[in-house]
Amino acid sequence: MPREFICTLTTAELSEIYHREGMTIKKMCPIVGCKSDITMAKILHQHGIDTNNNKRMAFQKRGGRTDEEFKDFLTVQYLDKKRSMTSIAKELGISWVIVSRYLDKYNIPKRTKSQQQHREGGSNWKGGRHKASNGYIEISVKGYPRLNKRGYVYEHQYVAEKKIGRPLRENEVVHHIDRNKTNNHPDNLMVLTKEEHSKLHQKERQEARKRVI
């Protein structure tokens, strides 16, 4: 009766060779020290390594990441860092179509064509400056410590901080002197505490009512 072959490599080492280095079962035989493809396949199965070629190809397309790891990777790269599908695909050595399919698989919302055009490098890129839905201007400032999830900061806050030479405190807001939310010239901006800002608007409302009467 032939003696059972004993593999001295760990599961992690076998997975690294088979999945990440892309070795075939036949090529792994001399590395592991066995002579039979069948024996090599059994060893992989014993260590919980799936030899299904489709799954293996998917693993390689994901850059050697598990399904969950790749989902997290795409979420950070596509949603948080605002990278394009083409840029991500180039890094992984696959087509953007495959990246698109994975976004669908993981229910990661895709940017619209308009959003894509307005991102850096797009045909409608305006240097990272646009009007938000609340009427304030947002700008993209690389390296700024207090960007929102989309990578922007309100321009009036950024300009005001530059003007006073320090970050805004939690109890401070930026007031537009001429009430024009898009006029973010330093001379039109005033840093007030929330209490001061509230009192200022209250006084303005009282004066407005007097003018009506």
Image (cartoon, grey):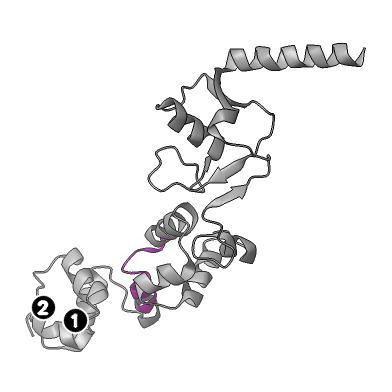
Q: How far is mark 2 from mark 1, CA to CA?
A: 8 Å
The amino acid type, in three-letter code, at marker 2 is Val
Q: Is residue 186 visible?
A: yes
Q: Residues within 10 Å of mark 2 (few under 14, many from 20)?
A: some
Residue 45 placement (x, y as % from top left): 26, 74
Q: Which residues are magenta?
A: 57-67
Residue 144 placement (x, y as % from top left): 40, 41
Residue 167 placement (x, y as % from top left): 42, 28
Q: Nearer the viewer, residue 114 or 211?
A: 211
**Image marks 2 and 1: residues in contact by CB distance under 8 Å:** yes
Secondary structure beneath dot 1 equals: helix
Work out which residue is located at the far front of the displayed protein and give it. Answer: 187
Which residue is pictured at 60% across the width and 29% down the height?
188
Which residue is pictured at 69% across the width and 29% down the height?
179
Q: Is residue 29 left or right of residue 49?
A: left
Q: Earlier in the sequence, mark 2 or mark 1?
A: 2
Numbered label attached to residue 40: 1
Q: Is residue 133 above or below residue 168?
A: below
Secondary structure beneath dot 2 equals: helix
Task: Determine if the magenta segment contains residue 104.
Answer: no
The number of numbered badges drawn on the structure is: 2
Q: Quadrant of the N terminus?
A: bottom left
Numbered label attached to residue 32: 2
The amino acid type, in three-letter code, at marker 1 is Met
Q: Nearer the viewer, residue 15 or 112?
A: 112
Q: Residues within 10 Å of mark 1 (few under 14, many from 20)?
A: many
Name the mark nearer the viewer: 2 or 1: 2
